[in-house]
Every structure is written in structure tokens, then in C-alpha cells.
Image: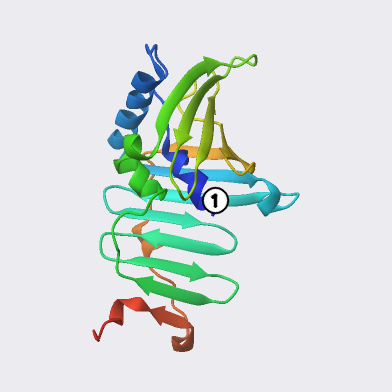
Amino acid sequence: MKLKVVMVILGLAPLLMAADSPTEYYSRVERHLRSLPTLEVEYLAEGLAFGDEGMVGHMYWLRPDYFLHDTPEWSHCDTRTEQWRYLKGQNTLIRETPQGRTDWLPESILLDISVELQPRELSTAESGQTVLTLRSDSPNSPGELFLRFDEASLHPNEIEYMGDDGSTTVYRIVRWLENAKIDTNLFTPQIVPVENLIDFRTSGGEN
């Protein structure tokens, strides 16, 4: 799913200072990420999958245990004790026991960023933007990522994913708020009718 694939990179906020190589620059990015207690991001996704108007989504991180990704169609939440998904059109809630960090989910990349993505190039575009190019050789989502930063900016304003299958998706950052005050109630599952609840936490004979 392209959205899940690319949005992992929305956590990338560089320290814009001289770097001898893309790897060193990327290391600065990682260290900055790990220093953030909270992060709130709003984005506009553009590509064939999102229609002419695109799609607006929100992401919230609350260190060390909370992540929420909210879109007009669904919400996905991951905490230390539970993972849940809410399908808005169906008013259906799916609750699961966390099975460990999944490739390309934002919280996984924040913790193991250098494992999943390899920095390949650091360049300056004609527009003056700094462009960091990264490569993914993951079997599930191989391709290249281009992160574009305005001069003196502390976060990417655009992220482009080009898959090896020829697909292209662009994520434009609308709002980036570090150290935001995030209400923990955001990570509480919605209440739905019992017939709309799918609870995998009780599978395997547990009640």
C-alpha cells in the first residue's frame, strides 16, 4: 500500500548543516528524530490512487509508545499494548495484539531507519532545494524516495516515492509541529456496536 510505504518518511526532519556525505547527513536526520518527544504532521497525498483532489492525512507520534495515522477512510493506531484499525465507512473496529514492528510503518523506521532505507545522494536542485535520495530494496516496496527541503528549513516540504513498478506518489507537508501537545485520548479505540467489532486479541483460545 503506497500510503503506508511512503508515509514512514514523514518523520524525517534534518538538521541542515554541512555534511560530507549522504550517509552523514542521514545520520543527523536520525539523531534529530530520536530527540523528539512528540511530532504532529498533516500532509496532502497526490497520485493515481488519490484522485484529482488528493487526500489529506494526519500522523501523530507520542514517544515512546504511541503512533496514530488518520485518513478520511481509516485510522491505524499502534501502542505498546495494542494495535487497532478503524474503518470509517463500515464503522468497524479491528483490535489486535502487537506482533512487533512492521516494515515501513513510521514507528519502525524511526527506530531502525538505517536498516530499511539506504541514503544514495545529497544534491541541490535548480530551485535551491536540498534533495536527499534514498533507496529501498525491500521486496514489498522497492523504489526510491526523494526528500526535498527548502533552504534553512527544519523539515521536508515534499516527499516523492518512485516505485520500481513505475508508480509515483507525492506527499506535500501541510503542517509539521514538533514537540506538540498531543492528547492521549487520540490513541483510544472508537466505540462501535458489538457486531462491528473484530477482536483478534481473543484468538487462540483466549477469552
Total number of numbered discs in the rendering = 1
Seen from the viewer's position, the closer of residues 80 and 200 is: 200
Q: Is residue 203 left or right of residue 93?
A: left
In the depicted structure, whether residue 149 falls above or below residue 97: above
Which residue lies at the image location 34% right of the left edge and 47% below the top edge? 108
Residue 207 x %, y %: 25, 86
Q: Residue at x 35, y 48 (%)?
A: 107
Q: What's the residue type where badge 1 is placed?
A: Leu
Residue 146: x, y in percent? 54, 30
Residue lying at 64% horizontally and 51% vertically, measured from the top left: 55
Relative to 151, 185 lies left or right: left
The residue wearing badge 1 is: 3
Q: Is residue 72 above or below residue 93?
A: above
Q: Is 80 situated above or below 159?
A: below
Q: Residues within 10 Å of mark 1 (few under 14, many from 20)?
A: some
Quadrant for residue 1, please give it: bottom right
Coloration mode: rainbow
Label 1: state its secondary structure: helix
| Quarter where residue 115 is shown | top left
Q: Which residue is rendered at x = 41% and y = 50% of the image?
A: 105
**Residue 101, percent across and down?**
31, 54
**Residue 199 place in picture, x, y as percent:** 37, 79
Q: Quadrant of residue 11?
A: top left
